[in-house]
Amino acid sequence: MSERLIQAKDLCVRRQGGLVLDNVSLALGERDFITLIGPNGAGKSVLLRHLLKLETPDSGSVTHKQGLRIGYIPERFQIDPTLPMPVRRFLTLNNNQPADALAELVAETRCDMLLDKPLAALSGGEMQRVLLARALSNQPHVLMLDEPAQNLDVSGQLQFYRLIDELYEKRDLSVLMVSHDLHMVMSSTRQVVCLYHHICCSGAPDSIARDPEFIQMFGGEMAQMMAVYQHSHSHDHTHDDACDHTHHHEVKP
Amino acid sequence: MTAPLLITATALALLAGPLGCFVVWRRMAYFGDGLAHSALLGVAIGLIVGMSHQIGMILIAIIFAITLIWLRAQRLLATDTLLGILAHAALSLGIVAMALLGVEDAEVHDYLLGSLDSVNADVLVYVVLGCGLSLGILMRLWPGLLLMTSSEELAHAEGVPVRVYEFLLMLLLGVLVAVAVQIVGILLITSLLIIPASAARLFAQSPEAMAIGGSLIAGLCMLAGLPVASAMAVPLGPTIVALTVALFVLLLAGRLLVDRLKPAG
């Protein structure tokens, strides 16, 4: 059994009276690749922010493994145009990145042509790659991404998810990602967690697609599409069956 | 013109460049104004308790920052509204307290607009110590502050103690206010922060270049403003600020010209 890097136990978060997170427990182990899905307002970003310890829950706890380093891509990143910040400076801020490590990092994330550009002049796709490089710059154990491809076009999304997959294969990383692009992430994701204030279901993508709660939430068409997509790509990976499929039979509020 | 005045101006310029950048980047102009306005109350408290004006001003700056952070966390009113309330409360209390203490209008006027004979050798130690210490702290915090100015969430996730850094930045601004009151005066301190940094932004390609440029411009204008104000017998603060504005306009024209001459694309 792999060691737990991040463990959330019984998280409850209230916002304006309503429960945004209702008794959510989640564990991220070494080499895990988890994608968090769920409808808008389901509490995905809130959960991620709590897993990062950016916020404190009303009850429950989040524990990090001692010395855990996290690379994070926030949902929104907008640099103030009055701050002149070349990419090179941004990637070396607050870490002691030696020159050769920086060269390797930017080659890996395809930012090598961007080093001398100011952040404010980057396109959406370029910015996401620079943020990815920044997230990897402190040699993280965990990569956390909050809808990293939301502002990219379809081919940009595909390229970005391929890049994440590549990095996951190459580096000793665990990945936890919030995503709307279900059909995109299914080929690389090893485990899907479906959230709607509580964890509705979790497991390998193909088993998720057969889950009644998932079908109820996203509709039969989406489930079918996922199943088909998953089926045609199942030769890509071998980990799927190894994932536990836990199913919580909870009564919805 | 005296040596203490020159030293104070130089120390002030060194601090005003980088701090002014953060005021511009983090949109703290209104905060700087509020902090400056509260300085008069600091002077009054200094007079009542019998301690140096500078210590009184820094004390009030700390109280100002803590009150603002606390009120902001209650999420009842917008930050600029809170700042408006705090700033004008402090300014009116300060002026009333000065009147009750029997401080002459002319002296209050000097605090508001700066004066050539406000710096003497006694306060010079405080000025040099305060500015040196602040500059040291600022250099230490610089990378973390830049990261959290780029993205607060990112800095937080990477382990920068964001709230502590923010408070320290407010504190450093408090020190700057306490020093700057002597020369520029309460009413114009924010302009000493914003105008040089903005002028430097027009040509700066990196955050460090903007900070150093800001210091150079602030220093140049202060050192030029001292003899001008003394020769023409005009208030010091407005003279210095008028010079920074002139330099800003010059650089702005230069920047626009460069943009126009550069071939499109």
Image (cartoon, rainbow, N blue to C red):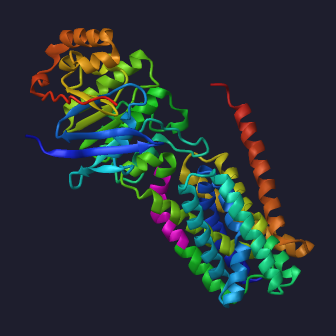
B209 or B162: nearer the eye?
A: B162
For image coordinates 57% across by 80% down, the residue present is: B129
- Horizontal side of A53 relative to B131 (left or right) equals left
For image coordinates 83% across by 73% down, the residue present is: B227
For image coordinates 59% across by 66% down, the residue present is: B67
The residue stretch that appears in magenta? B134-147
In this view, the residue farthest toward the left is: A1
Asked if one can make out residue B223 in the rendered structure from this viewpoint, the answer is no
Quadrant, the C terminus of chain B: top right
- Horizontal side of A218 relative to B196 (left or right) equals left
Q: Is residue B104 above or below residue A28?
A: below
| Residue B183 location, quadrant | bottom right
Counting from the top left corner in percent of width and height, residue A8 is at 25, 45
For image coordinates 68% across by 54% down, the residue present is: B81
B138 inside magenta stretch: yes
- Horizontal side of A101 relative to A20 (left or right) equals left
Quadrant, the N terminus of chain B: bottom right
Q: Is residue B30 above or below residue B233?
A: above
Counting from the top left corner in percent of width and height, residue B151 is at 48, 45
Q: Is residue B194 above or below residue B234?
A: above
| Residue A214 location, quadrant | top left
B141 or B228: nearer the eye?
A: B141
Principal secondary structure, stretch drawn in magenta: helix
Counting from the top left corner in percent of width and height, residue B50 is at 67, 91
